[in-house]
Amino acid sequence: NDFLSLERIPNLVEISLFFMTLKESHLAEWAENPEMFYIDRKNAVPEDDIISCAQNLYLSLVESKCVITVVEKIGAILLDTDAQLAAAQFEAGINTDSDALRSVVYWDAIYTSFGLSFNTFQQHSNFNVHQWFESSFILIIKALLEIPKQIPKRLPILRYRSLWLIGCSTSHQKNFHFIAAILNTILVDSSSDQNDIAVKLVAIEILHAIVYDPPDENFITYIHAPNTLISSIYNLASNCDEYLSKDACLEVVPLLLGCFTISGIKIDGETATAITSPLSQIWDNSVDENLLLRRSVISILSSVTVLVGKSHVFELHPIVLPLINHALDPKTQDLNSFLIEDALDLWLILLRLQQSYDTNFNVIFVRIQQLLVQDLEHVRKLMKITESYILIGSKDFFMDHSDILVNILRDLIGNVSPRGALYVNLVLESLLRKFPVEGALLLLDSGLAASMIQSCASNHRNEKGCEPGRVINIYLTVVSRIQLVLPGKFEALMLQYEKNNLFSFDQLIELYFNQFENINDNSAPLRQKLWAMC
């Protein structure tokens, strides 16, 4: 308490500002590689970096008993709009004062301290933050952005820091029209050397902060031509060398598209195509250390698919289906195993939006069986996808892919948990409802019906390891549907069981009665009706 005296605090603030100021070595690093400068500054820690250490000192002062003294000192400096504007004009090439660079890095440090203590300013200072943003700061931003065509190239120090300051205050900002215009200018305008990769990555950071939890649900409407903005983000990702930078760019796109959903806005097929067309190349280029970027590609495709809805989803098939096929290809599983869940989600979204069946889906249907052969981890989603195929597919699809369907069911019936059997039942029910006769014939001719009857017999005899009652209820319902549409063939099958003393009609009926009152789910009335009819 004695050390942090009112007389000493201003000096400590000055010390922290001095060491927060960018030195020539920092500026040289920035000039040589803006992307690495951004990454290094973002990941800097006090143990290795003097600027971070100075920031920690400043934050300690802000959190001390002398907080009001600290913020009032910074607030008083921020009131000097003329000095800030002069520094901004030097950076913008409007004046050529040789000493102005010193002023630029000084104001960079001041803005850094203001951003670090922004919430404290709101709580403990008489400094009118909102008024400063609406008056002084807008003038400074305009001076930075309105650059003459021919100027010596200068590092965009204040442009970078001003954007960062906006990011620190997004939850308190009100003028999102203005912020959207700034971000659009920074990310879309490629004519200015001042919008280097470091500046654009800060703009991405701000955009992420806004669209992650939009404070204004109409934010997306303030952006002119969002598809152009998204294309510019793709270009930025392509121009970056580091995975972290590329990932930050692509990660913001699904969030940006989510703002359309929040605003209740749909996008047309042309816009959707413009957004998704570059993704195939991004996918192909995402190899080695950038392989994880493919997850963002699938996330973007899922967002666009939902936004276009049923009327235009077919226009995405040429882009989306090959990527799903590649993600689920057994030959690429060593590389793409982390994509399976996301690819299955996208596949299911596509199927559920179909108004009619597209034969282009035929190519990837076999992936269901191939995934089940590997393991049963994805049974729930795979059964929902199979169900969707059956419900929207034609009889031609059923006939052409019946062998694959049989193999899918053969891999699962009797081999999954009772919970998994519930998802298998989705396929059995959709099959016997959509194609009653053909589905029943398929189950009989493939031996799948016989397998289910065998399981019923084992349960009736209470054999060790037999399938439980809730699974038997599923099999009994399937048997009922088969018996109702193909009574002769079903009777012939049961006679074979009776002849071999394996399972009789009487025992089957007894099992029905035993299970009749044990159906405790929402399907109980329908199952009981089917059983009674059988």
Image (spheres, rainbow, N blue to C red):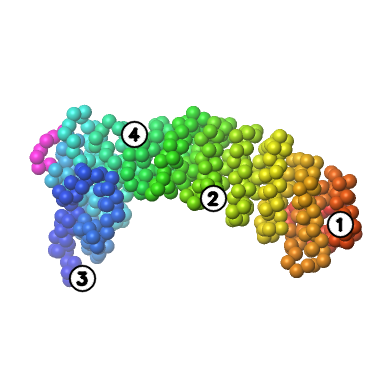
- Outermost residue toward the left? 98
Say what amino acid the circle numbered 1 marks.
Tyr
Q: CA distance from mark 1 to mark 2?
A: 42 Å
Q: CA distance from mark 4 to mark 1?
A: 73 Å
- Report x, y in % for residue 305: 53, 38
Among the two numbered marks 4 and 1 on one chain, the one whose residue lies closer to the N terminus: 4
- Report x, y in % for residue 391: 69, 40
- Assess whether mark 2 and mark 1 are in contact (beta carbons under 8 angstroms): no
What residue do we see at 20% from left, 43% from top? 31
Say what amino acid the circle numbered 2 marks.
Glu
Q: CA distance from mark 1 to mark 3?
A: 92 Å
Q: CA distance from mark 4 to mark 3?
A: 51 Å
* Left or right of 372 in this view: 52: left
Q: Which mark is residue 150?
A: none
Q: Which mark is residue 1?
A: 3
Among the two numbered marks 3 and 2 on one chain, the one whose residue lies closer to the N terminus: 3
- Report x, y in % for residue 268: 51, 30
Residue 96 lies in the magenta-colored region: yes
Among the two numbered marks 4 and 3 on one chain, the one whose residue lies closer to the N terminus: 3
* Left or right of 358 in this view: 296: left
Residue that label 2 marks? 341
Say what amino acid the circle numbered 3 marks.
Asn
Residue that label 4 marks? 188
SS assignment at label 4: helix
- Outermost residue toward the bottom? 2
Which one is in front in this view, the residue at disc 4 or the one at disc 1? 1
Residue that label 1 marks? 497
Specify few, some or many for label 4: CA neighbours under 10 Å numbering under 14, 14-19, or 20 or more. Answer: some
